[in-house]
Amino acid sequence: MSWRVGELKNNETVKIKVGFGFDTHKLTEGRDLMLGGVSIPHEKGALGHSDADVLIHAIIDALLGAAGLPDIGFQFPDSDPQYKNVDSKILLRKTLEMICTRGFAIGNIDTTIVLQRPKIQTFIPVMQHTLSQILNLSADQLTVKAKTSENLGFIGREEGISAYATVLLEKTTDGR
């Protein structure tokens, strides 16, 4: 039997979709710094309508984009009081339900957090575990990386934080 790229044994083709997500928030005193569902000790936290978890928000936008759905602001608008200070892990679970309903499964997620301080390397395994549990992923399906901006721009001045996410979805069923 010969195999061709994108073909399953029973001659059903695999449909894959790629999504890209980005989020950025201002850093301010008096807020918790939430990253990947984990509270990071720091004198500043991200300012936002929800808990302002830039990593989860970037993942949500990547998932929604790959599934052909409108962005996080459409799905969970900041004009809706039910999302005020909401735990972004709840939004991630709802997003997973949306993409599963459309017949998609997550192939992998690759992310990068960009911040000057604090150094978060020791928190990355906890973030990966937290996110993997929510998304039902194995350790090799999710990466979290951290970078600084080499003291350049608003991130370098410690005024803000950003995150990027790339997602691969695989179509498993027709969904709805």
Image: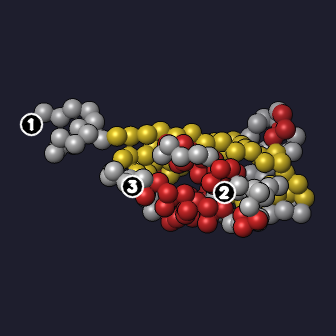
3 or 2: tag closer to the N-terminus: 2
Task: Say which element carries label 2.
Answer: loop
Mark 3 residue type: Arg
With respect to residue 166, does 59 lie above or below? below
Q: From the viewer's side, name the closer residue of 43 and 86.
A: 86
Task: Say which element carries label 3.
Answer: loop
Quick check: marks 3 and 1 in contact, CB under 8 Å? no
Residue pictured at 66% horizontal, 62% vertical: 88
User: Circle 1 is placed at which residue position?
Assistant: 1
Nearer the camera: disc 3 or disc 1: 3
Q: Confirm whether residue 152 shows in the render.
A: yes
User: Circle 3 is placed at which residue position?
Assistant: 176
User: Circle 2 is placed at which residue position?
Assistant: 76
User: Whole-Å distance between the Cαs marked 3 and 2?
Assistant: 21 Å
Residue found at the far left of this picture: 1
Q: Residue 71 carries which label?
A: none
